[in-house]
Amino acid sequence: MAERAARRCCLGWDFSTQQVKVVAVDAELSVFYEDSVQFDRDLVEFGTQGGVHVHKDGLTVTSPVLMWVQALDIILEKMKASGFDFSQVLALSGAGQQHGSVYWKTGASQVLTSLSPDLLLHEQLQACFSISNCPVWMDSSTAAQCRQLEAAVGGAQALSRLTGSRAYERFTGNQIAKIYQQNPEAYSHTERISLVSSFAASLFLGSYSPVDYSDGSGMNLLQIQDKVWSQACLGACAPRLEEKLGRPVPSCSVVGPISSYFVQRYGFPPECKVVAFTGDNPASLAGMRLEEGDIAVSLGTSDTLFLWLQEPTPALEGHIFCNPVDPQHYMALLCFKNGSLMREKIRDESASGSWSEFSKALQSTEMGNGGNLGFYFDVMEITPEIIGRHRFSAENREVLAFPREVEIRALIEGQFMAKKIHAEALGYRVMPKTKILATGGASHNRDILQVLADVFGAPVYIIDTANSACVGSTYRAFHGLAAGTDMPFAEIVKLAPDPRLVATPTPGASQVYEALLQRYAMLEQRILSQTQGPPE
Ligand SMILES: O=C(CO)[C@@H](O)[C@H](O)CF
């Protein structure tokens, strides 16, 4: 077989909800290797669905930690069998599903530091975890712990100012509190608590990897301004917690050389650097090469906004995390549950199930929709907490129906005005250099993206984000190699493929939407006060 040319590279890992994925990226930032292990398909003995176990209470959701370990074994053995040249790996980093937590049993660190290269990881780590089934981000069983935490620090807004978010059931501090309260023996036999990201990094490091600032911002425990654990939050969750978490580190930190286990078993170079792993969303921000003032809009089942912020304004909606590629800045995440399922429903009802009819309706109606505004939340919306469909005429009078073209434009304009209003509430501002990066299913519809460009008053680009968390992790690994040189992340990734421009704002758009956005915000508050009473 022809000798493979040596190809210096970095590896990027993603320990996500449904799979472990890896990509290899060379010095020209080209992806030349990728593979994945799907938990449900390749590790059927664990019996997961979508990578998780939903418990009988319908609220508790966990994943088996040994399934994650075994998935890594499989993927590494597949790479080895395929002849992947590990000796060319300069550095690696990775991502993990956010908020999940791993509980290392007392004594596990000795096992981690003395792994035998003759055995697989999962054969040696069987007895290293005090909790076998780890809580993950889909869990919503900690409402009581959320209330206790908010009460301990002075309320939801106070907690948001401190940690970047009000208390959320999936956030790690509340999950740790539940384990301490309901399984105190397991908690007492736990010497280290990792996030999924720092757990994965620990496997490569052969010792406990610290939590990084960015993923640590998803715990309701880290003070996002000072980048230290909040003593008030730690104390409210569980005793002796700080010693179990270790000190958090900047996300761009090199946390150490790779463990000798990987050198001896797979042929990694001993000087291969491990760069702190982070959360999947922060890693995706890196993969999309978001820069200050940019906004990424993932138009999927639920719509997710990634924002780059210099000065955050923590609120009762959305999440502020420390920025994964610039330690002085921040990122924000906003989730809108009524995304593509809502667009598909209106397509079926008002465009005979056809996207081309849907697009024609957008083409045949004017910006501003003649003053008609709509709110379309067939499931309880997260941002804000409203349910139902609410339509208003230009005179702000609630009406029961719109003509079908007006309905279609009202849906799309309303979805994007909500995004702009709530992004600005977190401190986001459109800047002259702002780029909107659109991803996800609806980003294939140019007419929908034209409305996005008009509402935000900024150009819209599309970018392939299939492997954004993995690719972002390789970029962060390359950035880690330049540690100490103060080279900015943007400089490291300038060779990466550029996003493609697909829509620019229609002349006059900002005048139309400046007025409409104010009305939208006012009407949103009207609906909220009718359904929830006056805001806090
Ligand atoms: O909970 C989330 C973010 O806050 C999800 O996006 C998880 O990170 C998915 F793994």
Image: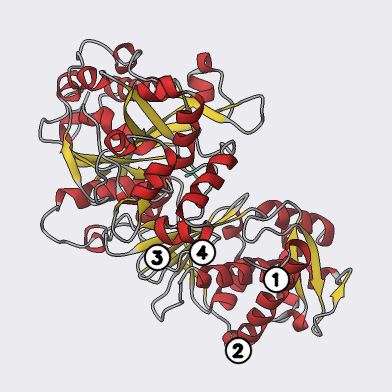
Q: Nearer the viewer, residue 442 or 163?
A: 163
Please state which of the two labelled residues, at mark 3 or mark 4, is closer to the viewer: 4
Q: Earlier along the polypeptide chain: callout 3 or callout 4?
A: 3
In three-dimensional space, the C-alpha distance between marks 2 and 1, rounded to whole angstroms, equals 20 Å
Image quadrant where residue 269 sits: top left
Q: Is residue 197 visible?
A: yes
Nearest the viewer among 4 and 419 is 419
Task: Locate residue 299, reporting x and y percent.
Answer: 58, 56
278, above or below 348, in the image:
above
The first of marks 2 and 1 along the sequence is 2
Residue with the mark numbered 2: 511
C-alpha gap between disc 4 and disc 2 = 27 Å
- Left or right of residue 383: residue 359: right
Q: Kindly identify which residue carries mark 4.
A: 315
* Label 1 Cα neighbours within 10 Å, binned few <14 / some 14-19 / many ≥20: some
**Badge 3: residue crowd in 10 Å (few <14, some 14–19, many ≥20):** many
As measured in the structure, the alpha-carbon distance from the residue carrying label 1 to the one carrying label 3 is: 25 Å
Task: Give the residue number, with chain letter if any, for mark 3.
Answer: 308
Question: Which labelled disc corresponds to residue 524?
Answer: 1
> Which of these two is toward me, 253 or 501?
253
Mark nearer the viewer, 2 or 1: 1
